């Protein structure tokens, strides 16, 4: 299968939540932190390339409004909150523009997207077989498959914000938006798979000897703070990744990917993707699928969710197979790789 870190973390937190996402279900309303973070990342990506703050703010606002347009209905009284979020993103980009003028590093690559095969993982791929032979049994044991295209390695997919040279070392730049003010925000990244995955994948994709990640946190105002007077000053912390760290990550992500696909290919897939009630209220809010999981069936009801756009992981299967994208797989501005930390 093809896995990115967002899907991996979602699967480890709650397998049932991963099942809902794989089936294409997303909440009818707006995942407000997600589209705010997506708009911000769209703006910063533009800013790195153009060095033009006005263009970056326009790109960010367009991204936010494009994501908002996918929601079936936005109440008029909700628009003031969304307009405030757009203002927050623009002020973040103003702060980024001022920071860039003081930065001493050199940007080597503004953005890197990678798709790398994980070594020693060739197997009969459930997800590839599902595309090539829809409706057929996809277990090589139950129904041996003669299509050599179904024998694939696991792949790691990802997208980094940029690669830069700083203090005689090569780094990946990764940005987060967060309202957390405690030092624990920084502690969580020392062992975090996302940073390791970026170094691992970008190294293989570019051939550069990347040493680690400079993580930048852009602060977010609380609801009772005025975004027009809030101090949007980014904070940064470097995280090194050694050869030993990357080797350990490789072993772990291979096991995670194999376990994920094993659940997906289980004849009773829904039960294989079992619930983790400890994750129902992560980030101090209910999971989007909480109401469905409370029911006896645990399954979605008609009209309860909307269908999400295909993400860049699903599109990568067609890249691997050399097939054209099916109609309707349009490019979305949001990046599922960028996990927003509240």
Image (tube, rainbow, N blue to C red):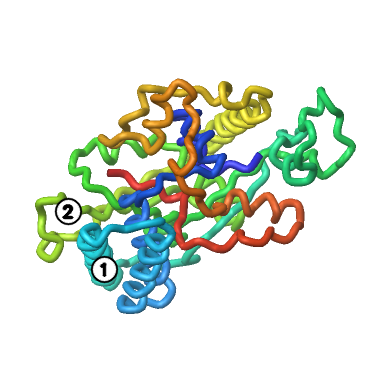
Q: Which sits in the foreground, 12 or 164?
A: 12
Q: Residue at x 40, y 56 (%)?
A: 71
Q: Quadrant of the C terminus?
A: top left
Residue 88 visible here:
no
| 131 left or right of 110 in image | right
Q: Is residue 124 above or below residue 201?
A: above
The image position of residue 102, as x and y in percent, is 26, 69
| Quadrant that contains the N terminus | top right
Residue 19 appears at what percent x and percent y?
A: 53, 34
In terms of depth relative to the viewer, which is nearer, 256 or 102?
256
Taking 255 as reference, is 73 left or right? left
Residue 264 screen position, x and y as percent: 63, 30
Residue ID at (47%, 36%): 301
Using the image, determine if residue 144 lies above or below residue 151.
Answer: above
Instruction: For mark 2, give the secondary structure.
Output: loop
Q: Nearer the viewer, residue 94 or 263?
A: 263
Please tell me which residue is depicted at 67% across the width and 39% down the height of the picture: 154
Q: Are marks 2 and 1 in contact (CB under 8 Å)?
A: no
User: SS at mark 1?
Assistant: helix
Q: Which mark is residue 264?
A: none
* Residue underneath mark 2: 221
Residue 37: give x, y in percent of width and height.
34, 55
Image quarter of residue 164: bottom left
Within-10-Å neighbours for mark 2: few <14, some 14–19, many 20+: some
- Who comes first in sequence, dot 2 or dot 1? 1
Please, is residue 276 above or below residue 64 in the view?
above
- Residue at which label 1 appears: 90
């Amino acid at each position: 299968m093809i896995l990115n870190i967002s899907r991996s973390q979602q699967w480890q937190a709650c397998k049932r939540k991963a099942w809902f996402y794989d089936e294409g279900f997303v909440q009818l309303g707006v995942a407000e932190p997600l589209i705010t973070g997506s708009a911000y990342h769209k703006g910063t990506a533009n800013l790195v390339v153009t060095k033009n703050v006005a263009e970056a703010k326009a790109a960010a606002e367009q991204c936010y409004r494009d994501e908002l347009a996918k929601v079936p209905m936005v109440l008029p009284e909700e628009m003031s909150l969304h307009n405030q979020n757009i203002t927050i993103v623009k002020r973040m980009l103003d702060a980024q523009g001022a920071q860039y003028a003081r930065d001493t590093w050199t940007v080597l690559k503004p953005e890197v997207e990678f798709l790398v095969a994980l070594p020693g993982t060739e197997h009969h791929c459930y997800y590839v077989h599902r595309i090539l032979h829809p409706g057929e049994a996809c277990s090589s044991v139950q129904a041996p498959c003669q299509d050599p295209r179904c024998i694939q390695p696991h792949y790691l997919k990802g997208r980094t914000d940029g690669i830069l040279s700083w203090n005689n070392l090569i780094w990946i730049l990764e940005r987060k938006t967060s309202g957390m003010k405690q030092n624990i925000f920084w502690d969580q990244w020392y062992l975090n798979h996302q940073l390791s995955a970026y170094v691992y994948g970008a190294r293989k994709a570019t051939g550069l000897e990347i040493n680690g990640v400079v993580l930048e946190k852009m602060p977010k105002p609380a609801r009772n703070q005025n975004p027009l007077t809030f101090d949007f000053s980014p904070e940064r912390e470097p995280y090194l990744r050694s050869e030993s760290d990357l080797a350990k990550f490789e072993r772990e992500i291979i096991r995670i990917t194999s376990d994920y696909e094993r659940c997906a290919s289980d004849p009773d897939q829904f039960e294989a993707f079992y619930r983790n009630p400890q994750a129902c209220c992560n980030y101090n809010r209910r999971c989007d699928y909480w109401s469905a999981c409370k029911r006896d069936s645990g399954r979605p009801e008609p009209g309860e969710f909307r269908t999400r756009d295909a993400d860049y992981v699903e599109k990568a299967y067609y890249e691997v197979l050399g097939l054209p994208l099916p109609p309707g797989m349009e490019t979305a501005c949001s990046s599922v790789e960028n996990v927003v930390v509240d």
